[in-house]
Amino acid sequence: MMSNAVLDTIAARRSHRAYQDTPVSQEHIDLMLKAFLESPSAVNKQPWHISVVRNQQLLDDMNAAIRAEVMKRTAADRSPRFEDNKFHVFYHAPLVFFLSADPTWRYAALDSGIAVQNIALAAESLGLGSVILGMPRDAFAGEKADEFKKALDFKAGEEFMIAIAVGHPADDKPAHSIQEGHISYID
Ligand SMILES: Cc1cc2nc3c(=O)[nH]c(=O)nc-3n(C[C@H](O)[C@H](O)[C@H](O)COP(=O)(O)O)c2cc1C
């Protein structure tokens, strides 16, 4: 089958859930931010804002707030990962990007999803690993929501869209299995 650098990068990407302590270089951060800013968006609105977080104390505080919020729900209504007390939403990654946007814009979530995938592929292409994170949403549901929005420099009216943890991976995992039946040809 034909291959090229882009297809190889897409095929090699995995969600990594363990990271080395090694920080991500500023050069690599700049390249991922460039890939983020080059993302397409509906009517070229570029509706997003990105927060580049290396402050581990803030990530620990958010992890605790998320756990507190999630544990209010039934076990069936939360990820089984939370049954492990040592589970950390950010997997102790040295770097986490948070994307925020005005949720009243109809394409805010879709554009943010596309942009976060650009970061994931850029990270992979640089020899880094990543995991896209929806769970941080719960940090913005609890009583510390405004505190976290301020700490992350969300702009007025913006809400959390998606996050992505990045670092040098310390795990190895196979590609996810491909489910059947998701393609229809209409000729
Ligand atoms: C929108 C979105 C949200 C996700 N949120 C989380 C998350 O909060 N925590 C996590 O460990 N993985 C999260 N993932 C990663 C998925 O679990 C992962 O992509 C999926 O299991 C397939 O595995 P792969 O990425 O290694 O191919 C998320 C992925 C997407 C696309």
Image (cartoon, rainbow, N blue to C red):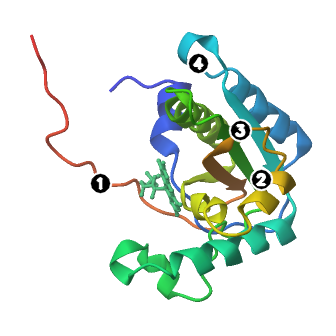
Mark 1 or mark 2: whose residue is earlier in sequence: 2
**Label disc, if present, on residue 11 of the rendered structure:** none
Picture residue at 84% right of the left edge, 34% below the top:
30
Which of the 4 quarters of the picture holds residue 26? top right
Q: Is residue 184 above or below residue 170?
A: above
Q: Position of residue 90 (x, y in %)?
A: 67, 66
Q: Earlier in the sequence, mark 3 or mark 2?
A: 2
Q: Residue at x 77, y 74 (%)?
A: 60
Q: Which quadrant would the N terminus be assigned to in this image?
A: top left
Query: According to the image, label 3 marks what residue?
Result: 157
78 vs 29, nearest the viewer: 78
The residue at the point 72 percent across, 58 percent down is: 168
> Who comes first in sequence, dot 4 or dot 2?
4
User: Which circle's residue, 3 or 4, is located before the other in the chain?
Assistant: 4
Q: Residue furthest right?
A: 26
**Circle 1: is it few (<14), some (14-19), or many (20+) Cα within 10 Å?**
few
Task: Give the amino acid type for the residue marked by disc 3 in the picture.
Answer: Gly
Q: Mark 3, mark 4: which one is toward the viewer?
A: 3
| Mark 1, residue position | 177
Write down the residue under mark 2. Answer: 149
Q: Are marks 3 and 2 in contact (CB under 8 Å)?
A: no
Residue 40 disc label: 4
Q: Secondary structure at mark 3?
A: loop
Kind of residue sitting beneath label 2: Lys
Residue 89 as seen in the image, left or right of residue 1:
right
Q: Residue 137 at what x, y percent from top left?
A: 59, 58
**First of labels 1, 3 by sequence position:** 3
Q: Circle 3: is it few (<14), some (14-19), or many (20+) Cα within 10 Å?
A: few
